[in-house]
Image: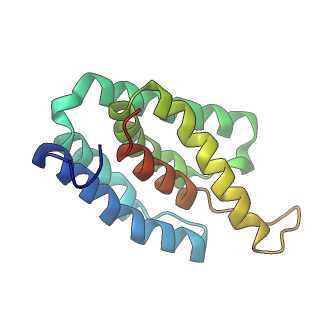
Amino acid sequence: MTIASASPPTLLPVLFLALLAVPLAIIDLRTSRLPNVLTLPSFPIALALLIHTLPAALLGACALTSFHLLVRTIHPPAIGWGDIKLSPTLGLYLGTAGPLALLLAPLIASCITLALCLTRNPTWRTRIPHAPGLLTATLALSLTPL
């Protein structure tokens, strides 16, 4: 699906994701934090916008959130709680894009996150914002038929 061919029921959720992604990415890059005021209400809004794909969307939300919680359990500094709170929302979108999107998004996000890290002259203690990569991957995969 491209923006030009998107039908009204699918265009609105993608526009919401884009509007959410910009401030979250900027805030995460500047502060390494994701504010609850943006992450928490985004889930019910996205759920309402994606209601026509409910089973796949909920499966995606559960899968991505579980993956991020697993990462947090194995190595807590690897992912912040803000990223975990954003996971259900992004999982809704990735679930509607298909199972391949759920596998590709963390890989694409990791590549983007690594590139961001390398531009900051990293040390072992450098905090790396993960949300910009995950938001970019989710938005790209939401616009791409898989």
* Residue beneath the point at 19% across and 44% down: 10
**Nearer to the camera, 33 or 4:** 4
Left or right: where does residue 135 sit relative to residue 51?
right
64 shown above or below 34: above
**x then y, percent, for residue 47:** 24, 40
Left or right: where does residue 122 sit relative to residue 54?
right
72 shown above or below 8: above
Q: Quadrant of the N terminus?
A: top left
* Residue beneath the point at 75% across and 40% down: 75
**Nearer to the camera, 71 or 13:** 13
Q: Quadrant of the C terminus?
A: top left
74 shown above or below 6: above
View extreme (bottom): residue: 30
* Residue beneath the point at 56% across and 36% down: 104
Q: Is residue 62 visible?
A: yes
View extreme (left): residue: 8
**Nearer to the camera, 43 or 3:** 3
* Residue beneath the point at 74% across and 65% down: 117
View extreme (right): residue: 124
**x then y, percent, for residue 34:** 49, 63
Q: Quadrant of residue 99?
A: top left
**x then y, percent, for residue 21:** 40, 62
**x then y, percent, for residue 120:** 76, 74
Q: Is residue 127 visible?
A: no
